[in-house]
Image (cartoon, grey):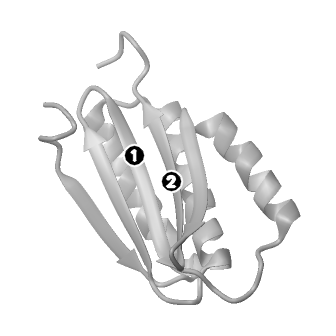
Amino acid sequence: MDATDAPLMTLTVPADVRYFRSVRLAIGGLATMVGFDIESIDDLRIGVDEVCAALAEAGNGDDLRIEVLAVPGERVRVEGTVPHGDDQPDADRFAFSRQILSVVADDHGYAVEGGQVSCWLERRLAVGVA
């Protein structure tokens, strides 16, 4: 199965930290199906928390839209979007968030474009694991 065949799961959750656990659990379950080990799943869950927190902080309070692509034997990509809020996010917190994502994800990014905030991460399955 390649990325074009992999199902795309979409989650919509309130921009409230109390709902982030549900996102972590769903993505952890998908990561298990992809073939990730426990340590990689834990890293992915930490990264998902950072993505959700960044979106909630930079967004306008609307629900977060999280799309998850889980390609068995290959990778998990999590991308969230929300309409941009009026306030500027705390630069120090975002710098810390980027540090965390650089450790727990193979690739990650954050952008504000066309009134939308997007934040994403990708974690690939270790070579020789599956």
Image quadrant where one finds the C terminus? top left
Q: Is residue 50 left or right of residue 68?
A: right
Q: Are marks 2 and 1 in contact (CB under 8 Å)?
A: yes
Image spot of residue 27 (x, y percent): 38, 53
Spatial CA distance of label 2 from label 1 is: 7 Å
Residue found at the far front of this picture: 114
Measuring 51% from the left and 47% from the top, which residue is drawn there?
A: 121
- Count of numbered badges drawn on the protein: 2
| Image disc number at residue 16 | none
Measuring 63% from the left and 58% from the top, which residue is drawn there?
A: 50
Image spot of residue 57 (x, y percent): 67, 77
Residue nearest the observer in this picture, 68 or 110: 110
Asked if 8 appears above or below 81 in the picture, the reply is above
Image quadrant where one finds the N terminus? top left
Disc 2 designates what residue?
A: 120
What type is the residue that disc 1 sits on?
A: Arg
Disc 1 designates what residue?
A: 77
* Badge 2 or badge 1: first in the primary sequence: 1
Please tell me whether mark 2 sits on a helix, a strand or a loop. strand
Task: Specify few, some or many for label 1: CA neighbours under 10 Å numbering under 14, 14-19, or 20 or more.
Answer: many
Measuring 39% from the left and 46% from the top, which residue is drawn there?
A: 77
Q: Is residue 57 left or right of residue 26?
A: right
Asked if 20 appears above or below 122 in the picture, the reply is below
Residue nearest the observer in this picture, 48 or 115: 115
Image spot of residue 12 (x, y percent): 36, 77
What type is the residue that disc 2 sits on?
A: Trp
Asked if 68 appears above or below 13 in the picture, the reply is above
